[in-house]
Image (cartoon, rainbow, N blue to C red):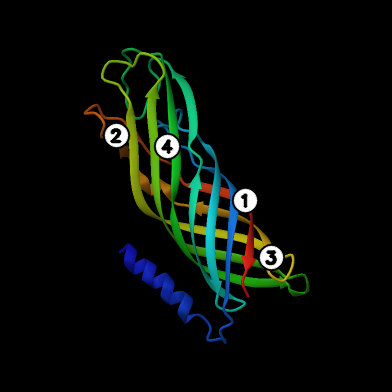
Amino acid sequence: MKMKLILGIAALGLSLPAMAWDLNPYVGVDAKWSKMGAQKGLGDTQVAKNYPQGDLFAGLKLNDWVGAEVGYESTTKKNRTVVTGSGQGFFGTSVTAGFPVSSTTKTRLAGFHANVVGFYPVLEECRVSLFASIGLARLKFSSDLNFDDVAPIGMEYRRFVKRKWVPRVTAGVEHMLVENFGIRAMVSWEKTSTFRNIFSKTSSSPLYVAPKNTTSAGLGAFYSFK
């Protein structure tokens, strides 16, 4: 199913308006601030919500209107330390023995993405264009849980990790400062809630984490080889 969607996106890019090709390759980097967090009761109080993120990308404009882009994105590994009291939610469990307890989670989201991109020149004399893209990302969600002191009975270090294809959408504006160098600003959305309940396989005691969808905003710079 995912492969069919990838091929469909590629076919869409190649079948869009039969204008003369004017190939324009480019590479660049984005700096973003992402917001994700976790579902209520499934890590929401233990998992960090905001993450610095960096993206590396390479693209090919087929003409002034259509292009394709691939890249690699990664948040930093963000720590969050909390003290969980008796009766509070803890990764989907209602265990209370041994609480309150201090724990630290280290969470990261990273992976590759591929998109079809559409461009719309709005101020041609100033070389400003709007752009929007749709595609897929192959992301890896990982979160390490460590107890900062004595762990409750049946609890110990846990690692939650899962890889999954997720849809992603981006929209923004770009401006060519000079002939071969430009800047851009964008907002993005990725459906990371499709990870659902990630089970820690470190122990037979069930703990779960479920990420929310990810939204991000940032600025980037790119170099055109045309």
Q: Secondary structure at mark 3?
A: strand
Q: Residue furthest left?
A: 204
Name the N-terminal-most of marks 2 and 4: 4
Question: Residues under labels 2 and 3: Cα distance?
Answer: 46 Å
Q: Secondary structure at mark 2?
A: loop
Question: Residues under labels 4 and 1: Cα distance?
Answer: 24 Å
Residue 106 x, y percent position in the rendering: 44, 32
Which numbered disc, 2 or 3, marks the residue closer to the eye?
A: 3
Which numbered disc, 4 or 3, marks the residue closer to the eye?
A: 3
Placement of 167 over or under 157, stated as above or below: below
Name the N-terminal-most of marks 4 and 3: 4
Residue 175 x, y percent position in the rendering: 70, 64
Q: Which residue is mark 4?
A: 39
Question: Residues under labels 2 and 4: Cα distance?
Answer: 16 Å
Which numbered disc, 4 or 1, marks the residue closer to the eye?
A: 1
Placement of 14 over or under 46, stated as above or below: below
Q: Which residue is mark 1?
A: 218
Residue located 74% across and 74% down the image: 124
Question: Residues under labels 4 and 3: Cα distance?
Answer: 41 Å
Residue located 38% across and 32% down the image: 144
Mark 1 surroundings within 10 Å by alpha-carbon count, few (fewer than 14), some (14 through 19), many (20 or more): some
Q: Which residue is mark 3?
A: 181
Mark 2 surroundings within 10 Å by alpha-carbon count, few (fewer than 14), some (14 through 19), many (20 or more): many
Mark 3 surroundings within 10 Å by alpha-carbon count, few (fewer than 14), some (14 through 19), many (20 or more): some
Residue located 33% across and 12% down the image: 98
Question: Residues under labels 2 and 1: Cα distance?
Answer: 32 Å
Is any part of residue 42 visible from this angle?
no
Q: Which residue is mark 2?
A: 200
Q: Secondary structure at mark 1?
A: strand
Left or right: residue 212 compared with residue 27:
left
Badge 4 amino acid: Gln
Mark 4 surroundings within 10 Å by alpha-carbon count, few (fewer than 14), some (14 through 19), many (20 or more): many
